[in-house]
Image (tube, grey):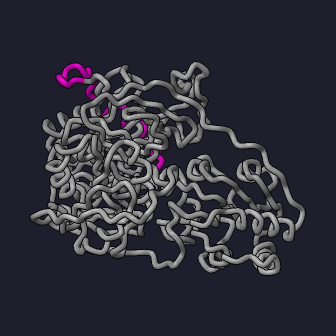
Amino acid sequence: MSVLVLADHGLGALSPATARVVGAVSTLGPVDILVVAENPAAIAQSASALAGVAKVLTAKGSSLADGLEALLETLTVRYRYVASSAGSLGKDVMPRLAAKLDLMPVTDVIAIHGPNSFDRPIYAGNAVQTVTDNQPRHILTIRASAFRPAATGNAAPIEALDGTVVSAASLIATHRTESDTPDLATAQIVVGGGVALGSAENFQLIESLAKKLGAAIGATRAAVDAGYAPNDWQVGQTGKIIAPDLYIAIGISGALQHLAGIQGAKKIVAINTDAEAPLVKLADMALIGDLFEIIPQLLAELDKAGLKR
Amino acid sequence: MKILVAIKRVVDHNVRIRVRPDGTGVETSGVRMSMNPFCKHAVEAAVQLSEAGHGDEVVVVSIGPRTANDVILTALAMGAHRGILIETDAELETLAISKLLAKVVAEENPDIVLLGKQAVDDDSNHVGQMLAALTSRPQATFASEIKVVGQALEVVREVDSGRETLSLPLPAIVTADLRLNTPRNAALPMVMKARSKPLAVRPAAEFGIDLVPRLKIEKISPPPERMAGKTVATVADLAAFIAADVSDMEAL
């Protein structure tokens, strides 16, 4: 009943989502982690420290879908479950692998009820589907923000696989958003900004509040479309799904598609001029007013309150 | 060059859906339906490639009940040349959909297959990737830019860390994200013209695919409701609320 997890990583480090995927699937059986990277060593070290991990497998190569499909297809025979986070890598690869194996995947899992019973959201999180998967193997993607991370302190053995992962496609450029804020999908606090910010310069107000709180930065689709924020900050049905302890939504009215991305937040704070905005109605705490006046005051008040992060 | 676009008819994305009280599904009768927004971006991308001289023919295919003809007509009005409806009243899983589409790819042999990255009803985000596996073609999902460069495509993808550019040898499969383009609204003459374009209706059974679902849907439930919140009057009160919440958080 063992599980193979495909690791998510970036800039040579294991992504925080992987610890949460391991936390989620370790109830299903012993977990092996596969790290595919040009330089997998450091990532594999972090993966081997996760509790519940029996073994870390490494392979050299790129993380493009067709190459990963071929590698995973050969490995899958040994496992009952193959899982990854429901981030851009898992979404790209897992359905492809499933079809190759003639399996129907269960994706974006938000709850595991038993060895073959899973919950997944549909209609932008406005409904939840409970499915039973009686296929001989299970291909899963896990919504990382819905699960607690696995503990660390383990030292699982690391085993290098022969050969390199090759793809018919080739990666010719990457455009990485430079930011020293925490990973959005797994952050404990997120500060989000909407189109009301009015410009990329003004969006720095959101960034300064995020920095003060040690928070990740989110944005609405409209703010990203307008060029105020990079695409990987988009929160919503088609962007990132977040479940922080605290979400502070600033100048965001709350389109259905944005609300889909924040339903898992424990507490929501809204700052908006419109007392009738859907997000204000949804928030645990709201302040009605002009964000350009409120944010500088809020920064000062948080200092006064002795907030330390 | 031939471009195939697969499109889906879904509950309109602006409709606030209602879960049936008996847990059997989401109420879809009497609800406004339209083309899945991501599919519209895929159709627009195909028409733009064709207008730029990269596609002699744009073929659209949809799978669903007879009423799904309306989204095919929308695509034809946007500039696609020919439509295929694979007719079925059954709710098909993405694996069955992909197998039907693989048959269409085998018949039509398109150089590029474009799809929306996900449908806003089941939010699966599967079909492009599955079709790529079943047809052994390279894929670029979540595309925000597509360029034809010789016998290859250069596709900018939106990924968790930002963007990346892939080069794909043709034939290839691309799924559209929202920033790929702005879908056109077809003018009335185009809508009229669409009705005279070829549209083949073929029963799903004709393709000889096992369409039986693999997963059993036990129930469909509404998400937990949030409690209505409060409003504070001053910035100081809000700061106190945030500071208290932050100090309560367990350190990671």
Of the pair B15 and B1, the residue shown nearer to us = B15
Residue at the image position 39 percent from the left and 58 percent from the top: A51
Residue B23 vs B110, above or below: the answer is above
Can the viewer see residue B78? no
On the image, which quarter does residue A59 sit in? bottom left
Of the pair A20 and B80, the residue shown nearer to us = A20
Q: Look at the image and say whether residue A180 sits in the magenta stretch.
A: no
Residue at the image position 80 percent from the left and 61 percent from the top: A273
Can the viewer see residue A207? yes
Q: In this view, does A8 lie to the left or right of B36?
A: left
Residue A290 vs B232, above or below: the answer is below
Q: Is residue B152 left or right of residue B251?
A: left
**Residue B160: x and y, percent?**
42, 64
**Over which residues does the magenta segment extend?**
B184-210
Residue at the image position 44 percent from the left and 52 percent from the top: A23
On the image, which quarter does residue B131 sit in? top left
Residue A36 vs A260, above or below: the answer is below
On the image, which quarter does residue A102 sit in? top left
Residue at the image position 50 percent from the left and 57 percent from the top: A240
- Of the 4 image quadrants, the one containing the C terminus of chain B is bottom right
